[in-house]
């Protein structure tokens, strides 16, 4: 009997520590300057919303805000899949006044990402959409978070929130130039995009939700390194245009200088600024407000 009582006391102590630790970590997450923390803590209001996978980080916020005079929030993340992007965008629309513009790099329709969806468990308490999406994508992780409060924070997304606890994440972009030996091998490298109906449908639903709020939506394909082969990109472009009824602004070959890239798929900061200047020239990005008036 004595051993049973000690065991029960130990279990209760572990559970109490788990719940206390979960509360501490949740507070750190909620107070962070990380983009998703700001989305859910009420500090994410913006005039321009940006959405993409790692290529969406080319929507370089310091340059966009300087060029337009408008506030921005970039909901892009490495490997962000379209279903998760749609949930985040719709949560944004539920919480804030409609932004003027939404820019979506459609290459986020290139993959599913069950692991990353589960990584958004720290934000599930603030979003029924996220909670349901995580439950559907990774039932084991979802139940794990029900059993252990600390389990929700065992992922990269929480680590990012901690890193940006006291600093802005607006400058999160490659700041290097592609190695010459890698650049020389561009034509021998390729990336294949498989167009799947469910991803295109998720894109169309996200666009429709934004347009229903009066948001002007722009679909784009950002620059790739010259000579790098992207298989299936034309099929993705056509499917996205047909599903949404919107033109897709195609900048895949807009930058020709290797010095503007960090790797085959991502412009560096100088490349991002050159790309954004093209977007503004084509009115995909708004003109500076003083000029517009």
Image: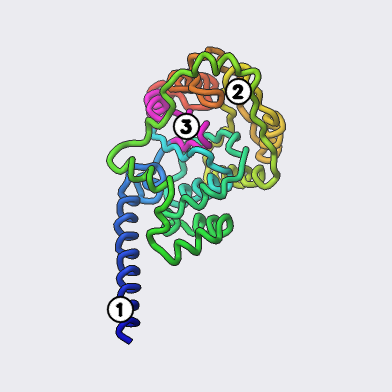
Image disc number at residue 252: 2
Q: Dot 3 lies on which element? A: helix
Q: Is residue 241 covered in magenta?
A: no
* Badge 1 or badge 3: first in the primary sequence: 1
Residue 136 rendering spot, x and y as whole percentages: 58, 58
Where are the magenta residues, as a range?
48-70
> On screen, 274 above or below 82?
above
Disc marking residue 6 = 1
Label 1 – label 3 distance at C-alpha? 53 Å
Q: Furthest-left residue in view?
A: 166
- The residue that mark 3 highlights is 57
Mark 2 crowd level (few <14, some 14–19, many ≥20, 10 Å Cα): some
Picture quadrant where residue 13 is located? bottom left
Q: Name which residue lies at 48% across and 28% down.
A: 58
**Which quarter of the picture shows residue 162?**
top left
Q: Position of residue 53 (x, y in %)?
A: 53, 37
């Amino acid at each position: 009997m004595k051993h049973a009582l000690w065991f029960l006391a130990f279990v209760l102590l572990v559970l109490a520590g788990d719940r206390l630790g979960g509360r501490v970590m949740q507070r750190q997450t909620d107070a962070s300057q990380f983009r998703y923390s700001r989305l859910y803590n009420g500090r994410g209001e913006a005039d321009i919303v940006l959405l993409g996978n790692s290529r969406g980080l080319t929507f370089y916020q310091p340059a966009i805000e300087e060029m337009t005079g408008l506030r921005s929030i970039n909901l892009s993340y490495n490997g962000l899949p379209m279903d998760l992007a749609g949930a985040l965008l719709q949560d944004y629309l539920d919480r804030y006044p409609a932004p003027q513009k939404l820019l979506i790099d459609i290459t986020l329709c290139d993959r599913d990402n069950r692991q990353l969806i589960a990584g958004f468990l720290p934000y599930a308490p603030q979003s029924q959409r996220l909670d349901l999406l995580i439950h559907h994508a990774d039932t084991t992780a979802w139940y794990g978070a029900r059993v252990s409060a600390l389990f929700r924070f065992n992922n990269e997304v929480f680590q990012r929130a901690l890193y940006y606890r006291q600093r802005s994440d607006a400058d999160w972009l490659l700041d290097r130039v592609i190695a010459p030996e890698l650049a020389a091998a561009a034509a021998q490298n390729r990336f294949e995009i498989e167009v799947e109906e469910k991803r295109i449908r998720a894109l169309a639903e996200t666009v429709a939700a934004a347009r229903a709020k009066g948001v002007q939506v722009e679909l784009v394909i950002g620059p790739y390194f010259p000579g790098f082969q992207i298989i299936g990109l034309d099929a993705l472009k056509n499917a996205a245009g047909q599903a949404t009824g919107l033109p897709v602004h195609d900048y895949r070959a807009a930058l020709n200088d290797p010095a503007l890239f960090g790797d085959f798929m991502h412009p560096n900061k100088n490349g991002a600024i050159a790309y954004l200047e093209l977007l503004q020239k084509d009115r995909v990005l708004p003109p500076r407000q003083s000029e517009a008036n």
